[in-house]
Image: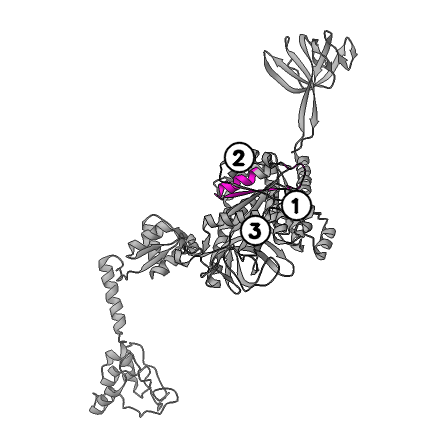
Amino acid sequence: RDGARPGGPRAPRLAPATAPATPEIQRAARQAPRPGSQTLDRRVDDDEDTRRKAAGAASKPISRAKGATQRREGRLTIQAVAGDDEGAVERMRSLASVRRAREREREKRKGGVQEQARVSREVVIPDVITVAELSNRMATRGVDVIKFLMRQGMMVKINDVIDSDTAELIATEFGHTVKRVSDSDVEEGFLGAEDMDEHMEVRAPVVAVMGHVDHGKTSLLDSLRQADVAAGEQGGITQHIGAYQVKLPNGQKVTFLDTPGHAAFTAMRARGADVTDIVVLVVAADDGVMPQTIEAIQHAKAANTPIIVAVNKMDKPDANPTRVINELLQHEIVAESLGGETQVIEVSALKKTGLNDLIEAILLQAEVLELKANPDRTAEGVVIESKIDRGRGAVSTVLVKRGTLKRGDIVVAGAKFGRVRALLNERDEQVPSAGPAEPVEVLGLDGAPSPGEAFAVVESEARARELTEYRIRLKREKAGAPIASGVSMADFMAKMQDKKISEMPVIIKADVQGSAEAIVGSLDKLATDEVRARIILSGAGAISDSDVMLAKGSGAPILGFNVRATSQARQLAEREGVEIRYYSIIYDLLDDVKGVMSGLLAPEQRETFLGNARVLQVFDITRVGKVAGCRVTEGVVRRGARVRIVRNDIVVLELGVLQTLKRFKEEVAEVGNGVECGMAFQGFQDIQEGDVIECFTIEEVKRSL
């Protein structure tokens, strides 16, 4: 192999390095590459003695055929060219190798690892962090962090999780500054700061219409907005919140929220009071103050919201508004006619009388409140209602509190987010934007958020995804919190074996999220210490195949409220034997569930007293055992009845059975008061004179919630 590199030009052969280097050889050595960059790869001819000296070996010379050409083996170096045979043999060490050797010697003398020059950094530390992530943020070897923790008495691995306090101690020890952050910091900035007064503009008042069932709330709203909503309500009652905006002839607008009046919708009425400026309390003049009326008053007071009383059904002959005013006094609602601050307006939704007076009272109250909002900012508000529409997907009714919601905005509502695809008003008309105090339906979210959740517009999808992922994780942790609350496995197994609570699993699907939430709340109230309804799934939308499969796996019936199952789900339910029940009125659903839960209750054991007897003498009979000779002192004793034996006022036998009852030598069924008889008890022989025998029967009585 001749030449400096494969395929390169052939270099001239050099003379054997047996004689001292000539000037020409020295010149060639100076032009050759330096050690460590590129060496000459040439084989030169040399005699056997020169090769043995260059190799420095004491081995036996290799015999070759006579006349054969002898070649020098090994690489040609500058030392070999210059005639330094020893240098040709010994490989020259690089400068880096020398430095490493010196460094090792210095470390050995020092007896420890020399600390490298540290660069101070700002290390961001969350609530929990792994050792690998912490070392990465500090730009430090993970082995050094583990060694430090081992010196502190902590045996950890590179992927173990440490808390924020330990991480801060490590970062400070390594000379870094620490910035503590928390997962909840992602919520900062979701809702903007308060607006300045110069940016505020007058907005429409938001009015919640509350009251008892069938007192005419929806009919009153129909009269105001000239629409017949009550005809479409099942059972003649409103079962979800409706949001409408009424435009008055003078150009002013009023937003109305119609909240249900039934007791099951307490949470929905509470949300209605929290998001509104004024509460219109509708009371029927012929019915007076009812339980849900009192509840609405409590919600309005808790939200610190002014109340306007609308005494409805004034067209009826038995209408008595004075009675309503007097009954409201018991709940600290004082009318203006009695020197109070509450406006009381007499109206008739059927005859459409007094409506203008009600509108004037609302506008007067709104003027006193000085309602203002900033429309020139990103929108914020609250979710009033949400549902799953088969054709449109998730549809959420929202109320904008400030700012302007536009089509194309990225909205986060609870654990759901999405880009607004369309905005619809209460007349199903598409609108480009919605300002303060304007209710609209939003299309485009990836799911149905829970009613009452705050919503806001964010700057990007990445920010929206970060928020929703944190909220989903937080919800999951809360759901699993009772499992990790320090209960041992032994306690858990004992509860499972004890099984004192009977559970009725159910799956609830409703037309809107608020109705499902109200049903779940009502079922929770039915729970007792012995029986309860376990909600496997609750949500809005039609009953799907996945719901049927979940019901099959959990052994639960499906309760559909104002929804129907798809054809595939219905066929699957028939094949799998899953029961689907449909309801349109909440009373029927609650009554059915209550009846089933009552059947899960253990029957009540009722004890009926029969009589007492006293043991006069005890006889020990062969092959029979002990027999008590007794006299009945009160009532009667019956064969087969339950007995309780009392000795010195202490019960020695509980729930025994009177196995044998004899009168003389004959077996009898019953012995009356004052008659002597013989008794033997099943499985009990410890009978003594003077014992008192109580005879009674036990009957089981079915219980109900």
Question: Disc 3, disc 2: CB below 8 Å?
Answer: no
Secondary structure state at the residue bearing disc 1: loop
Give the mark nearest the N terminus, 3 or 2: 3
Secondary structure state at the residue bearing disc 3: strand
- Dividing the picture into quadrants, the one containing residue 620 is top right
Give the mark nearest the N terminus, 3 or 1: 1
Percent of width and height locating residue 582: 70, 48
- Kindly identify which residue carries mark 3: 256
Relative to the observer, which residue lies in front, 553 or 314?
Answer: 314
Percent of width and height locating residue 334: 51, 36
Q: Residue furthest right?
A: 666
* Count of residue discs: 3
Q: Mark 3, mark 1: which one is toward the viewer?
A: 3
Mark 3 is on which residue type? Phe
- Kindly identify which residue carries mark 2: 331
Quadrant where the C terminus lies?
A: top right
Mark 2 is on which residue type? His
**Residues drawn in magenta:** 294-319
